[in-house]
Structure formats: C-alpha cells, structure tokens
Amino acid sequence: MAFFSLSETIEKLSESRQAIEINRSVNTELELSEIADRMASVGNNSKTLVFTNNATDFPLVINLFSTEKQTDTLLGLSGEDGYFARLNALLSLPEKGISLSPALLKTVAPLRKLGPKKLRGTGRCQKLTMKQPNLDLLPIMKCWPFDGGRFITLPLVHTIHPDTGQQNTGMYRMQVFDGQTTGMHWHRHKGGAAHFEAWKKKGGKMPVTVTLGGDPVFTYAATAPLPEGISEYMLAGFMKNEKARLVRSRINKIWIPESSDFVIEGYIDTAEPFRIEGPFGDHTGFYSLPDEYPIFHITAISYRKNAMYPSTLVGVPPKEDKWLGDATSRIFFPLIQKTLLPEITDMVLPAEGGFHNLALVKIKKSYPGQAVKAMHALWGAGQMMFTKVIVVFGDETDIRNPQSVLKALDQNFSPVNDLHMSAGPYDVLDHAAQSFSHGGKAGFDCTTKLPEEKKSNSESSNNLNTNSMRAISNSLHIIFSDHAVSESGNLFLSITADNGHKASGIYVIADSQMEKAPNDILLWHILSAIDPGRDFSLVRSTSSDGVLVINACTTGKRAVPSFRWPAATVMNIETQKLVDERWTEYEIGAFIESPSKRLAMLQSESYLK
C-alpha cells in the first residue's frame, strides 16, 4: 500500500467519483467554509472537495475524510491485509502459541515495517522552492466569522528534543500573522510543548519543520494518541503495511515524509515573548478564546510539482473530524482490550461529545464493581484522561443504538447508588472546566446489577410536570430555564416544590434558548457546558434512588482561561445567503441546506455573548 502525495490521492478518489472539483471562483474567507460545512453534513453522501480557483496557484483540498468508508480506505484499515486484520493476528499470538511456521512469519512480518526508511538526499516534496517564503501564496482559510484571522488547520509540526534527539510529530493549528510568521498553538500536554520547554531551558532558537499534505495516513498519525516515545511514522508504517519514506528537511535536518506536498521550515526563538493567538472556531463547536502562544518564524518553503494545499473545517458536529475520531476509537480499541481492559467489548466516543466529553463503554460483566473499575482504568489511559463522562453498560446493551442506551439508563441507573465522581485533567480547550485544564469526572454504572450490588429502593415516580421540559426517556428529562444557576439542586427544589419531591431520575437544566434545538445539538450543548464537579447535584427525595440534577445552563458561569463564555461556531447570515445564491454555479450536486440554520438559536452578532 504505497504512500501517496495529496495530488495522487485526489486522482484516485476522482476515479471512484469520491472527489469533486470546483472550478468556479470561491473566496477562502468564509465562503469556502460554508460549502465544506454543507458537504460534511450529508453523511455517507459526503464527498471530498477540490477548489482550483481560489486566487492562488495551488488547489485546496477539504473534507478528505468524508465518510467512514473513505477514511478506512485512506488509512488502510480494512481488508484481509488491512490494519485490523494484521493487528488482531498479532494480538492473538499468545493465545495460539508461538512456533516457527509460515503462518507465524506472515503474522509478524508487519513488525519489520514499523521503522521508517530514511532516504538520502532531497525528496520530491523539496523539488520547487519559493525565492522568498510567503504564506500569502497559499490558499489559507478563514473558517468562521469571529476567527482571529487565517489558520493553517492541517499542519504536521515536526520538532526535535535538544538533548535526546527524539523527534515528535503533532498537529497544532497555526494562525497566520503575516507571510513569514504564525502562532504555534500547542497545548501543555503535547509533545511539541514538551520539546519547547526543553529548548527554552537550553536557550536559543528551536528548529521547527512543518509539512502539509502527503499521504492522509500521516495526517492521521499526527493526531493519534500515541504513548510517549512511539514514533508517528512507526504507526503510519504499520497502518499502510509499508515502511514510511522520510527525507531530511534542508535547513533544520528534521526527518519528514517524502510524500509531503509542502515543507515549511523555520524556528521559534525561545527568548521571544509570546503573542496573542485566536480566537478560533474549534472542534468543540465553540471559539477557543485568545491566549498567548509561541511565534513560528518561517525561513524557507519548498513544495512538490502539482502540490495541493490541505485544509479542514471543525466546529459544531458533525464535521469530517467525526470520522477521524471514530477511527481513533476503533484503531486503539483492540490495544485497550488486550492490555488494559479484557472485559471491554465495545466503546463509542460520540461526536456530540467532542471526543473528550462523553464515552459509552460496554463490558462483559462478571463481578460486583466491575463497571467502576472500568471507568478508572480508562481515566488512567493516555488521552482518555480528558474524558468528562464515562457511561458503562453491560454486554446486553447495544451502545451504538440510542434507544438501547436509554433503556439501560432507565432500568439500571440509580443516582444514589450508581453515580461515581472523580476529578482529573481536562482538555485545554474545555472552557467549562472549574479551573484551567482540570475539573470533575462522572461515571455512570448502567450495567445490570448483580445480587451483591442490589439495594432496596422505595417506589418512585416521574410525575414532575413543567411547562418547559423535554422527556428524553422515562428517567431523563431536560428543563429549560432562564435562571442564573449557582446550585442546580436548589433550583430543582424550587421548581419541584409543588410536586411533593416525587420526581426521580436525571433532570438536566439547560438554557431556555436551546428549547427548540434538535436532540443531537442539545446533547452537544449540554456536554460542552458542564463540569461534573461543579454542576452535578444529588437531591434526596421520597425515592431512595434520589434525583441527579445537572446544571447545563451557561448563565452565571465563567469560562476558562479568561472568564469569557465563548460563542458557538455559526456561519453569518450573509455567507449563508451567498452560498444559497451561488449553489448551482459550484456544480456539486443537489442543494444542501446550511447546517448553521439548525443553530439559529446560537447565532451571535458579537464575539461575546
């Protein structure tokens, strides 16, 4: 499975009619984002888009990971010789016993392809060079109305440790300040940030080489939650069943993929003051707030013949990152199952949870307390440490079926007995945390209880009635309120005062503006507004099960790190109308309504609410 440049990848996608070329002039500021957002919203009918008329010499590619099937193909996941088949064969070796045989040799053969192949000389990605490096010659997008500027959204950022020589590849958005400088938005938990701190102690300039494009598997590998010390290119080699081909960047001498479309070399001066970067419409569906980050200075840009510029759009789900997030949960699931949780049989990270806010987990249960053990094991596993809410189900529940999930919640969850609270690290982008990158965790045990776990409960009823309430299931209700809430339990008690406190189950208090939102948008908004340590209250009632009240109101809350609650990523009305009017010109098929129309209740006329 050869490694391809982006142009070669698009050529193959075009042959199977999975890529559409748009030759009409399209503005890379907002208009292109709106088109891409619409295309990403149509599920399995989504296509990759190639914009050739964008006021630069380079085509722009977006929505590359357009469907689950296309993502699997691009990453080499499926088929007899695909990633899953080879990984499962390797993981089953101890069970089958190890003996020298042709079958064994075939099984372990992929291990020989883990280490990348380092080529001599320059690569095709360095064939052409800009006389003067200038980012203005690339079709870099401004994605959302309140973005702080144009952002490179799919960069592979290569850094090297000054003492150990260990190399890291990560994906950190880069705001363009001018033709030769950008921000470098790496978070405290990331490898690039760790390398920066090491260079800062040493002093001087930190070399950084950024690549764009190349084989899509490299784009994925840069986002993968790998353990420290494991090369992204080892993962890419195993996924493609071929050694990754690397060349040295000319100035920094950092190893990079030979299939890259662009190579951007430069440095970060560790003594230079940071610069304000952002806001940026992020994968959370909200604008990440402005903050200070290092400045990347560009000294050279080279590129391959027929180079294409890659971009992506993130925001309120679903977007194309849904398929990458889903791929991650599937790619690493067998390793979690084999090395950490043998009882786990399935795991889903719903796009509505932004991949950090919610995990649905299914286990084969055989002893009391096993669900709680699974929660804590996952909170201790790599980037699963960021997960706010983990819900554990028994093997009888289909966690990919919402009705099956809600049935288990109704039948098996008691707020008093089955809610388990903890605390730990949060994703840096989580603005709802009590403190920056740290907050509460909640675990829901929705497994069928064994005799040792059962507790006697008095009869309860769900007869609470309010004018502004939505029943999601027998035990899960949403109350819409305009109140500024400091303690959700107190608000619930005031609302239910006339009902004799006979309610039971889970009551979520959400902003009144969300009353008409579809269930998927409502779930996303609720999950993005809570910190379980602050917002979960257990209210005692005549039912020994009690009532779990969740304060998902944004009113009265301050966001981190700068206390300003961010706006949602909603396209402005002018751009929506422009794309409506020009749709037939684009020649990309039947009309697709703007996803932002589903978010009309969150439309903002200014950055701050």
Image: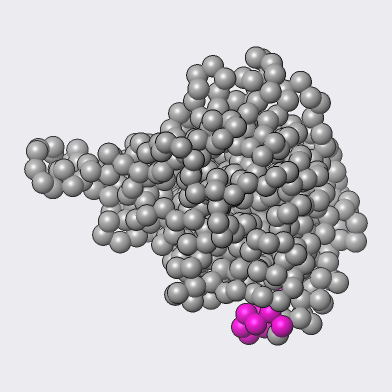
From the viewer's side, name the closer residue of 126 and 374.
Answer: 126
Is most of the magenta stretch helix, strand or loop? loop
Residue 498 location, x and y as percent?
79, 59
Tell me: 253 left or right of 525.
Answer: left
Please determine whether, in this image, residue 264 is positioned above or below residue 458: above
- The residue that appears at 74% across and 47% down in the rendered structure is 134
Is 590 contained in the magenta span?
yes
From the viewer's side, name the closer residue of 215 and 549.
Answer: 215
Residue 255 seen anywhere in this rendered image of the structure: yes
Residue 542 location, x and y as percent?
64, 50
Extreme-front residue of the structure: 131
Tell me: 122 left or right of 602.
Answer: left
Residue 27 location, x and y as percent?
77, 67
Which color scheme is applied? one colour
Q: Identify the image quadrant of residue 589.
A: bottom right
Tell me: 365 left or right of 502.
Answer: left
Please determine whether, in this image, residue 325 is positioned above or below residue 402: above
- The residue that appears at 67% across and 47% down in the rendered structure is 130
- The residue that appears at 13% across and 47% down in the rendered structure is 103
Please determine whether, in this image, residue 190 is positioned above or below residue 259: above
Is 66 contained in the magenta span?
no
Extreme-top residue of the structure: 202
The quarter of the picture where the N terminus appears is bottom left
Q: How many marks?
A: 0
Residue 246 location, x and y as percent?
44, 40
Please determine whether, in this image, residue 179 is positioned above or below residue 42: above
- The residue that appears at 64% across and 37% down in the rendered structure is 265
Residue 601 seen anywhere in this rendered image of the structure: no
Q: Which residues are magenta?
A: 585-594
From the viewer's side, name the closer residue of 125 and 392.
Answer: 125
